[in-house]
Amino acid sequence: MATVSLISDDAASPEVLAVFDDIRAVRGTDFINNFWRALAHDPALLKATWERLKVVMGPGDLDPLVKEMIYIAVSTANGCSYCVHSHTAAAKAKGMSDAQHGELAAVIGMAMQTNGLVTALQVKVDEVFKA
Amino acid sequence: MATVSLISDDAASPEVLAVFDDIRAVRGTDFINNFWRALAHDPALLKATWERLKVVMGPGDLDPLVKEMIYIAVSTANGCSYCVHSHTAAAKAKGMSDAQHGELAAVIGMAMQTNGLVTALQVKVDEVFKA
Amino acid sequence: MATVSLISDDAASPEVLAVFDDIRAVRGTDFINNFWRALAHDPALLKATWERLKVVMGPGDLDPLVKEMIYIAVSTANGCSYCVHSHTAAAKAKGMSDAQHGELAAVIGMAMQTNGLVTALQVKVDEVFKA
Amino acid sequence: MATVSLISDDAASPEVLAVFDDIRAVRGTDFINNFWRALAHDPALLKATWERLKVVMGPGDLDPLVKEMIYIAVSTANGCSYCVHSHTAAAKAKGMSDAQHGELAAVIGMAMQTNGLVTALQVKVDEVFKA
Amino acid sequence: MATVSLISDDAASPEVLAVFDDIRAVRGTDFINNFWRALAHDPALLKATWERLKVVMGPGDLDPLVKEMIYIAVSTANGCSYCVHSHTAAAKAKGMSDAQHGELAAVIGMAMQTNGLVTALQVKVDEVFKA
Amino acid sequence: MATVSLISDDAASPEVLAVFDDIRAVRGTDFINNFWRALAHDPALLKATWERLKVVMGPGDLDPLVKEMIYIAVSTANGCSYCVHSHTAAAKAKGMSDAQHGELAAVIGMAMQTNGLVTALQVKVDEVFKA
């Protein structure tokens, strides 16, 4: 698979290496996953994506583990295999238990099911639900 | 909109009314939203959907509010307008703050973005992410 | 809604009118629905779409009503409100009963649910399922 | 692939084995496909999913083969590779001919195409299509 | 519709107004569309989204009109009605002709169709296509 | 993968070979990719798909390279791995530079992100955007 090659550290430009270094520092690991190595063909895109991800997935009003589960939910509905894999690993690293993983899957499945039922029947939004 | 009519209490069969009654009891409100009134054309489907939803979205290893946010995330990725509206209302009722709502949207947007980047570049799953 | 206007019979070119006439003849009705009037801005696209639709949805190895239900299933998963409405009307015109409609929705919901579960858990295809 | 391991019969709890036994009995085969072995990490989810699937996909107002084709249609639109594979195998086992398979693909393709055209042009639902 | 209210200029904080002012300056119009007024509930999200959009959709290696058409294509496949409307307006403002609009729709429809055919048949990627 | 086998030249009927010959002539290569070999199980579907693709992706009001990028955009949003691979190869063959490829990915990612934000917040279409 892949429509671009992966940029190794040796092949990386200083601008790319600076982003890789920050990823390593923030995550406390030397490992750089394929996503960032693929994006590295476009250093500006790499940098902008990482800078934004760091903020959005960092500390805030939602728990970091909750954010990972939301990420898995979106990635599942979009059928992004890579994203489901990488964010499930991230969620486990942040403490997601097997029971929580099962429950996450159950909620995703339930949502998918009622999404289908609502759309198949074209149910009109109740007035009370509108802001 | 809608490809089926909505079943009023007066038009509901005893089997449907029993489900409506349980929805009212569990939720502590007399209001029955359009989704259930549309499903009521098929009493067995109505009952099975409600019985399962009650379990999946009820108390468990994940916080009920977190479940609602996961539901919103899936519904957004699937483009289900009704579902986004109804579960945003449910999330607010369960205490979602404006700041959490904004952060939820930001995480969904971030996930959508990287789903697109990963899929556009067909990035291969890192071995370390596989169970 | 709409990002293009709808072409009335009066505003239609001879090429467009010829397609409209064929739609009327094949369907046995004078009514031309909005989809064709929107496509009519591009007569070649209109003609190619209608000619192909006529073949694909016509008599063949699958029952015409089954084809409409497959169409509804795809349109639901894609969240195409217009398509769900128009093909539900077509399915009803071809004899879909209320019970069949409910069962169609149930199957769509079930498929959506297991699509979500499979993708959330990234289940690997069994060897026996490969052609 | 997979974000969870597959539960073998030896590793299965009595509750899981009971579901596996029922799957075997209903399907008349000893084979348990990966989907169920992945779900088995969460026995309650496994049981609820199987119990519901058994009802929805069983005898009713729609032909079981038609239900499998609807399942394939939804799974295709959602891009669920596993689901397309498993339900195509099921459809073939229930008698889907090569000609019907080709026609199913053609209808799915046609629906996808007009879903795209309608959404690109944002065509408004005709009043006559509303229930 | 909407699960949040729209922030008027009068209700906007200085941080929000600064973004609105930049949108107005870059676009050369006083009009602020609903998307930005909805995002304004979360000033940081508003600012980050606008700052990134300005760069991505601005001058670069692809023509701005081409970028708008790619945007419409993605938004169509995702079923985002708002996005199709707003970016079709933007594309027209950047010179998209009616003929180009029709051709864009035709390409989107063609891609949707073959996406469906490929996924329904689960066609394996040719080795020659891999980077 | 694949739910159908691939039809080799030796196994192809005269009708299928005629389409293969035309693909070879139009593309100026002897190579027939898997998509067409999979479709060849249904000669009428193969022929109709190729005839239409040839017209839609051929010379017109949009540049052929632009059409390929639109195709990639749709295929990405639909999660069609095969289609992303094959049309990225086609785009590169038509001159897409690495910089354009990166920018294409950035636009797709941006569109996905705002699709998610708009849908999460259910933003209402501005009147000025309606045709």
Image (cartoon, coloured by chain):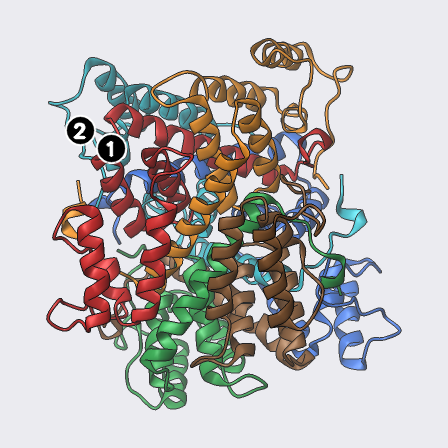
Chain colours: A blue, B cyan, C red, D orange, E green, F brown
Look at the image and tell me whether residue C91 can be seen. Answer: yes
User: What percent of the width, then of the height, locates residue D63?
Assistant: 40, 22
In this rendering, would D34 be left or right of B99?
A: right
What amino acid type is highlighted by mark number 2? Ile
A41 up-or-down from A95: above or below = below
Secondary structure of the residue carrying tag 2 is loop
Looking at numbered disc 1 in the image, what kind of residue is underneath it? Ala
D99 sits to left or right of A38 = left
The spot of residue A60 in percent (x, y) is 55, 57
Q: What chain letter is assigned to the residue under label 2?
A: B
Name the foreground residue: F122 vs F31: F31
The residue tagged 2 is B7
Residue B41 shows up from this direction: no
Camera-side residue: B84 or B89? B84
Q: Is residue A34 left or right of residue B115?
A: right
Question: Which quarter of the image is occupied by the N terminus of chain F?
Answer: top right
Q: Earlier in the sequence, mark 2 or mark 1?
A: 2
- Residue E5: percent from left, percent from top: 28, 61
Q: Position of residue C55 (x, y in %)?
A: 36, 49
Mark 2, other Cα within 10 Å: few <14 / some 14–19 / many ≥20 = some
State the separation of the CA atoms marked 2 and 1.
Answer: 6 Å
Q: Chain of mark 1?
A: B
Q: Are marks 2 and 1 in contact (CB under 8 Å)?
A: yes
Q: Is residue D23 above or below residue C53?
A: above
Residue at image coords 39%, 83%: E23
> Compared to B5, does A88 lie above or below?
below
| Disc 1: which residue | B38
Residue reaching furthest front?
F14
Place residue B99 in its image quadrant. bottom left
Question: Which is nearer the eye, E74 or A17?
Answer: E74
